[in-house]
Amino acid sequence: MPESVYKVIELVGSSPESWEKAAAVALKQASQTLEDLRIAEVVQLDTHLRPDGEVEAYRVKLRVSFKYKGHG
């Protein structure tokens, strides 16, 4: 296997439907500008609540790695 380097970033996605949808939204957006996405690790799950206590949005924090190609 050839040597390679990966960069890791954190993303936060949100959705009114589910944590799974929130993760999918974040990854779809990231894939539009980043190449060779490799791993997405869920770091944190939380919800944003309305004043009545109902869930307004599901949020997921992801640690995402992609192949680092450097400059030049």
Image (tube, rainbow, N blue to C red):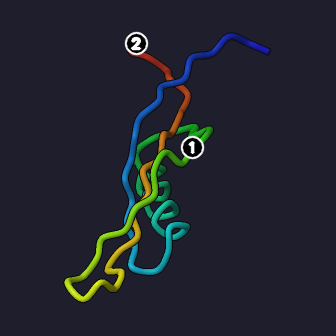
Q: Residue at x 45, y 41 (%)?
A: 34
> Label 1: how many residues lie within 10 Å, few (<14), some (14-19) or many (20+)?
few
Q: Amino acid at mark 1?
A: Glu
Secondary structure under the numbered disc 1 in the rendered image: strand
29 vs 51, left or right, is: right
Query: Which mark, by number, is residue 41?
Result: 1
Question: Could you say where residue 66 lies in the image, as x and y percent from the top left?
Answer: 53, 33
Q: Amino acid at mark 2?
A: Gly
Question: Could you say where residue 28 lies in the image, as x and y percent from the top left?
Answer: 48, 59
Which residue extends farthest front?
53
> Label 2: how many residues lie within 10 Å, few (<14), some (14-19) or many (20+)?
few
Q: Residue at x 56, y 17 (%)?
A: 5
Residue annotated with mark 2: 72
What is the CA distance from the residue labelled 1 to the residue labelled 2? Answer: 29 Å
Q: Residue at x 50, y 67 (%)?
A: 19
Which residue extends farthest bottom?
52
Question: Could you say where residue 22 lies in the image, as x and y percent from the top left?
Answer: 45, 66
In depth, the one of 53 and 57 nearer the eye is 53
Q: How many marks?
A: 2
43 vs 72, left or right, is: right
Question: Could you say where residue 8 lies in the image, as x and y percent from the top left?
Answer: 47, 30
Residue 58 image-quadrant placement: bottom left
Q: Quadrant of the N terminus?
A: top right
Which mark is first along the chain, 2 or 1? 1
In depth, the one of 59 and 36 nearer the eye is 59
